[in-house]
Amino acid sequence: MAHFKRWQAILVAAICLLGLAFAAPNLLSSKDAEGLPSWLPGQQINLGLDLQGGSHLLLEVDLKTVIKEHVDSLADSIRRELRSARIRFAGLRASGTSVVLRIRKPEETDRARTLLLRTVGASTGGGLLGGGGREVDIETQSNGQVRVTLTETALTARTDQAVDQSIEVIRRRIDETGTLEPIIQRQGKDRILLQVPGLSDPERLKRLLGKTAKMTFHLTVGCATVPKDTKPPPGARIVPNDSDPNIFHIVRKRIRVSGEDLIDAQATIGQQRGLPVVAFRFNSRGARRFGDVTRRNVDRCFAIVLDGKVISAPRIIQPILGGSGIITGGFTIKTANELALLLRAGALPAPLTVLEERTVGASLGADSISAGKIASILGLILVVVFMVIAYGRFGIMADIALTANMILLAGALSLLQATLTLPGIAGIVLTIGMAVDANVLIFERIREEVRAGRPPISAVDAGYRRALTTIIDSNLTTFIAALMLFFFGSGPVKGFAVTLSIGLATSMFSAIMITRFFVVWWLRRNRTKDLPI
């Protein structure tokens, strides 16, 4: 341990220089850091909501809509299966979490029950329940009455799936805005906590989350608009216009193409009028369906319905076979970009309601940063002074390693783009104290060896070798605790765990490698017979 090879010295120097390179942009303003050449590190530490301000929203997923849609889908499946089996029925309707119908020939009731259990009732490996279990309970009566009810297990699985899907869609929508490291967490059965640091336009955030963004394509009954009280023909419904709530269209209920098949959407400028439009592109399945419906329905109007409103109903002039098209609707550049973002991110499974909204001002963040800086600087000064008083020249070497440790910590936070929160600053302050802990153990071991009469090189070698196991054990147990905090803790606790974990790694490196480099270098240079420790 009292020997330091050339390649080890080169490695230590290279790691310290890399840490300095990645930490340096934090000394610049955000604008200056963005102007650095691409071949230089330009990433800065991300500040959390409590340090730079931002928006805090508590959202509620409309699970009633989720269950209703699931029951409606179950009704459609039952209708399709019974018709395929040529079992006549009547009065099929959704009622709460059940689908009720009557088999016209009561003697076919058992056959219908067996068919439905096999097709819509059992969950296979790819089903809602993920393998095993039953999704529905089926009750029958002698008069042919059948009630198909979703089981509690199926309802729980569907609601959990809806909340998890909502979190993923929210994350994609927020990431599209360029916001870094949003905190998105589930709370309870149907609520989602959203914290977005640095967001200067919370109203835009609510607009992005307030739209479900379910887009479907339907054929219309004629191209003319109609009054609201018009009675639609069977298989059709009245849908309002998005831009003018007093205009209504008659559209077929059957969905010809779904927005689920969209793979891209971009805001652009239309070639004909020079106005903003949204260009979209389907995957292979959507392109095939889009091509088929436009080829078979030339000269009919094709309505684009977004969240229950018609945003455009153009006439099909010719078949569109390339799997792409444009959406017009009196957009501005801003609204076209927002719609394109929503379509790219995907549709929410259900509407979201904002239950709580808070805005954290930048002034509070500035005060927190200032207090954190003062605490860090005071802690650093006190540790430096203590080490010099306690260990003299060796303490100075440990203080140099401590400075390198802080640079490496800042560089690692910038490189990993970890979010620094107020508890994270507390983790940095704790790291300052723990950073010299390993050196204290080593130096005390060296003192014991010197008192035992060992020569300097032998004392240093024995001190490092005997203290190494203790250092690894203590840091490993702390690292395990930090991992538990990260995986099971909430946002602020995770911020503390991140800085503590990175600080443990850099502290180990600075104590075992950097301090030892200076000690070995000093021993070789002075060839002293007495250690000043």
Image: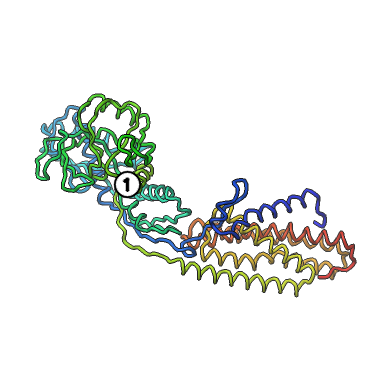
**Residue under numbered circle 1:** 332
| Dot 1 amino acid type | Thr
Q: Nearer the viewer, residue 34 or 491?
A: 34
At which x and y percent is residue 29? 56, 59
Q: Is residue 189 visible?
A: no
Where 439 sits versus 268, above or below?
A: below
On-image quarter of the C terminus:
bottom right
At which x and y percent is residue 326? 32, 36
At which x and y percent is residue 476? 63, 58
Task: Report the coloring of the rendering.
Answer: rainbow
Give the structural element (helix, strand or loop) at label 1: loop
Where 78 sits versus 527, above or below?
A: above
At which x and y percent is residue 492? 48, 63
Residue at 25% x, 51% y: name it: 64
Q: Quadrant of residue 195?
A: bottom left
Residue at 54% x, 56% y: name it: 31
Where 121 sits versus 483, above or below?
A: above
